[in-house]
Amino acid sequence: MTIPSLDTFVAYSTICFSIFGALLAALWLSLIIWTFRDMRHRSRDPFAQILAALVVALLPGVGLIIYLILRPPETLAESYERALEEEALLQEIEERPACPGCSRTADPNWLLCPHCHTRLRKACPDCNALMDLPWQICPFCGNDQFDPYHVELHHVHIDREIEAEVRLEAEDVEIEEQSELETNEDHLDEESEPGPFEPSSTDHD
């Protein structure tokens, strides 16, 4: 076995160091490109993008650690998705119906508010679909014969008038009965009292 000469060893060492240096240079260049692209996904400021790439280029290894510490926590796509979610939540809150009587959140399927008993919607008499109060025609079955909300209010108004009349009649009857009782008591008192010329039972004895 022949021992390699010094020139051969130096040649092999040079080749190995060249390959290793080329790999390090490729890694360094790829880190710079990756940093620039990652910063583009996180910021629209071109100055910040160039500055991040320069930090990684001028400080190999350490610059990448500094960039990972100081970079924005979320990408532009993640920030956009989060903004869309917040906007959707706000829109859902704004579109959620509220009771006109107590201003509390109401369910779209409620006919009455369970808190203040305010009428919220009405049901179609044909298909029982829920409709808004101002609607004069059912969009589901096309019924436009009458408005059950106004009919129900009319019946409620009539029932209240009947109750008021019955209550007044009952009060009048009570007043008449009390007056008759008072007059009967007065007559009884007058009959029980002796007259001025009538002898009492004690005088007769």
Image: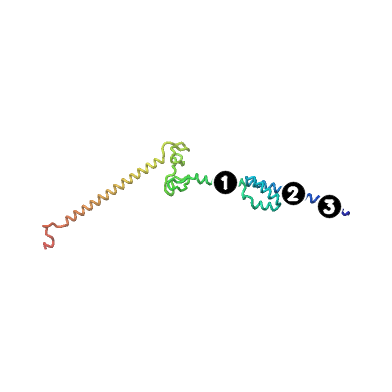
**Residue where numbered disc 3 is placed:** 10
Task: Say what secondary structure mark 2 lies in.
Answer: helix
Q: Nearer the viewer, residue 194 or 101?
A: 101
Does residue 60 appear left or right of residue 192 in this picture?
Answer: right
Image point 81% across, 51% down: which residue? 14
> What is the three-letter code of the residue carrying label 2?
Ala
Image point 43% across, 36% down: which residue? 144
Q: Nearer the viewer, residue 31 or 82?
A: 31
Instruction: Work out which quarter of the rendered image holds the N terminus and state it.
Output: bottom right
Is the residue 24 above or below the residue 150 in the image?
Answer: below
Task: Say what secondary structure mark 1 lies in.
Answer: helix
> Badge 2: few (under 14), some or many (20 or more) residues near its Cα, within 10 Å?
few
Name the N-terminal-most of marks 3 and 1. Answer: 3
Name the N-terminal-most of marks 2 and 3. Answer: 3
How far across and down, in percent of the image, does residue 53 sit?
68, 48
Does residue 53 appear left or right of residue 110 in this picture?
Answer: right
CB-based contact (under 8 Å), mark 2 and mark 3: no
How far across and down, in percent of the image, does residue 3 sit?
87, 54
> What is the three-letter code of the residue carrying label 3?
Val
Q: How many marks?
A: 3
How far across and down, in percent of the image, does residue 189 sit?
18, 56
Q: Nearer the viewer, residue 43 or 77?
A: 43
> What is the three-letter code of the residue carrying label 1?
Ala
> Badge 3: few (under 14), some or many (20 or more) residues near its Cα, within 10 Å?
few
**Residue where numbered disc 1 is placed:** 83
**Residue where numbered disc 2 is placed:** 25
How far across and down, in percent of the image, does residue 48 sit?
64, 47
> Badge 1: few (under 14), some or many (20 or more) residues near its Cα, within 10 Å?
few
Label 3 to label 1: alpha-carbon separation: 61 Å
Report which quarter residue 132 is drawn in: top left
